[in-house]
Amino acid sequence: MVPISREGRKTMKYVVVLGDGMADYPIEELKGGTPLSAANTPMLDELAKMSEIGLVHTIPEGMAPGSDTANLSVIGYDPKQYYTGRSPLEALSIGVDMKDTDVALRCNIVTVTEEESSYEDRTILDHSSGEISTEDAAILLEAVRKELETDICKFYVGTSYRHLLIWDRGEVVELTPPHDVLGQRIGEHLPKDDMLREMMRKSYDILNEHPINVERAKKGLNKANSIWFWGAGTRPALSSFKEKYGKKGVMISAVDLLKGIAVGADMTNITVEGANGGLNTNYEGKAMAAVKALTEDGYDFAYIHVEAPDEMGHQGSLSKKIQSIENLDQKVIKIVKENLDKSAEPYRMLVLPDHPTPIAIRTHCSDPVPYLLYDSTKKVESELHYNEADAKESGNYIAQGHDMMDYLFGNK
């Protein structure tokens, strides 16, 4: 049943399509273009002619440019007020009820080099161990858990290479994200804390010759041969999204971080079979889950998060990043638009990245990102395209990312 307002009109629906890390720097190989401008995106090209294009600054000054701070910002929560660390949000997602005295740490399973005799001399090759499956990663984490878990430190399985350590009465220590030091000697970037550093060192001895990694090496895949701690933080306290904005919302993501934000904000998480956070995720399933939530299940707002552009940026793969954007265009945005048009629901759709993950640096940066805002009830004519340069040329600029939700909902 289509919801009707008191005035007898259908109620407005709202959808965010977030291509994680989609924005980039100009690339010489693309003659100064970016993956976003080079990608074949007929749906975005069509929408751009009828939409507002602009820039939004999602990372508050002085804060690290992570998907945690950036997505909190986009979804309407000022990171300076609400952010307590990345891992606590992921803990919410996997059902870990943190005590106020707990510290959560992200526990990546990464690929490091093997030739060196010293752990400190090794180099990080891959922060995601070749986008290892959750099933294989869980077996490897269990091997680590058997050897290293204590009453103080508990391991929890997450998704793919992304896992969790809860440190009882721990400290929020400074830790380096592995994707920030790809190709670098790890010794300078290991934790200063002796216990954490020793656990990482021992994990290599446990994992490098594990049968799963022996088989991965035979297949030409990256070994998942070390854990890496980062993103420490304490228990978060987000306010309810429904109370904050008066909208009943769903989160559609394969990533524990985004699921955790949804749990903290009392939004509904929708799990889509085959959604894995990689290049070959179930894009269509995510799109249709959002359509169903908005048109059949009584939700006002859907947040569709796609991780692939960010992963391809970290890998430094230009062709795959372009492919991920083309997939987003045809397998998410097009499906959402066509089905919402068919339903005759009035809707506003916001398309944007959370932050750039430029190919040149293979990690995040704090530059403003381009947004596209489409309203099915308004006629807008624009000659701009949806890319970084045109967004800057538009002159439209939102200085604080956490104002984006109010802007989407027409409150500002």
Image (tube, rainbow, N blue to C red):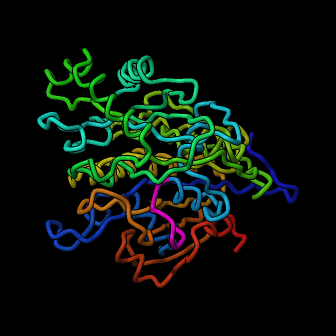
> x, y (%) of residue 283?
42, 40
Residue lying farthest to the top in this orientation: 211
**Residue at left offset 75%, top offset 55%:** 11
> x, y (%) of residue 55?
47, 74
**Residue at left offset 68%, top offset 44%:** 264
> x, y (%) of residue 82?
66, 58
Residue 211 visible at all: yes
**Residue at left offset 71%, top offset 49%:** 237
Q: How many numbered marks are there?
A: 0
Asked if the stretch drawn in magenta spans residue 63, the answer is yes
Residue 161 sits in quarter = top left
Front one among 374 and 319: 319
Up the image or down, 394 lies above or below 236; here it is below
- The magenta stretch is 59-67
Front one among 177 and 201: 201
Up the image or down, 78 lies above or below 54; here it is above
Front one among 367 and 344: 367
**Helix, strand or loop: magenta stretch:** loop
Residue 411 sits in quarter = bottom right
Asked if the stretch drawn in magenta spans residue 393, the answer is no
Left or right, 232 with reference to 326: right
Residue 290 visible at all: no
Left or right, 96 with reference to 393: right
Q: Quadrant of the N terminus?
A: top right
Up the image or down, 223 lies above or below 121; here it is above
**Residue at left offset 30%, top offset 51%:** 314
Up the image or down, 405 lies above or below 379; here it is above
Residue lying farthest to the front in this orientation: 194
Q: Quadrant of the C terminus?
A: bottom right
Residue lying farthest to the right in this orientation: 6
> x, y (%) of residue 9?
79, 57
